[in-house]
Image (tube, grey):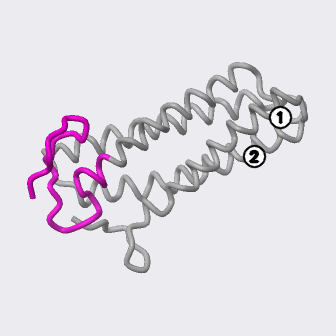
Amino acid sequence: MRSRVRAAGHAVHPILIVFPLGLLTTAVGFDVLYLVTERGSFAFTSAHLIAAGLLMGVVTAATGWLDWWLVVPRGTRARRIGLLHGVVNAAVLVVFAVSWALRLGAPDWGPTWPAVIAGWLGLLAGGLGGWLGGELVERLGVSVEEDAHVDAPSSLSGATSAR
């Protein structure tokens, strides 16, 4: 089952995920640098990285939801994992949006502790969302090939996928 949202022969969603993932992860790193050095430029950069990550996250999510809706067969494990993947990653965007909003009006966009904690929670949840995405592609073959095995057991089960 191949992705319907394609460019130059490749699925668009896996291409785009690197942007919100990289931007939001880097924002958390800049928060750490700000906390260690108290340099306002690090806080300013983190806030802007979050804004860019949120924008790219919405675009990336749209391509993922389209593929989930149009490609993944209903009633399959892949459909359930895909839904969970999307919900977790939507929650990541919400948590980072909260982190960004908590910085509004602060000098140099300096993050409060709740903003920093929200960023770390978003980062951890993003790891779970990424693992679920990996399960879809690597284990279940979604968006990889036409004869993907959409009811394969979890990669954590130790069972092999029968094709």
Residue 148 on image: x %, y %: 17, 60
- Name above or below for residue 36 compared with residue 53: above
Residue 61 on image: x %, y %: 45, 51
Question: Residue visible at 39% across and 72% down?
Answer: 10
- Among numbered discs 1 and 2, the one appearing first in the sequence: 2
Question: Residue visible at 48% across and 32% down?
Answer: 125
Please give the residue where the numbered disc 2 appears in the rendered image. Answer: 48
Label 1 sits on a secondary structure element that is: helix
Nearest the eye: 101 or 26:
26
Which residues are the magenta region?
135-163
Badge 1 vs badge 2, beta-carbon distance below 8 Å: yes
Q: Is residue 152 magenta?
A: yes
Q: For this view, does 42 lie left or right of residue 7?
A: right
- Chief secondary structure of the magenta portion: loop
- Name above or below for residue 113 compared with residue 33: above
Q: CA distance from mark 1 to mark 2?
A: 9 Å
Q: From the image, which quarter does the C terminus lie in? A: bottom left
Picture quadrant where residue 96 is located: top right
Picture quadrant where residue 46 is located: top right
Please give the residue where the numbered disc 1 appears in the rendered image. Answer: 109
Q: From the image, which quarter does the N terminus lie in? A: bottom left
Q: Residues within 10 Å of mark 2 (few under 14, many from 20)?
A: some
What's under tag 2, amino acid-wise?
Answer: His
Q: For this view, does 72 lie left or right of residue 28?
A: left
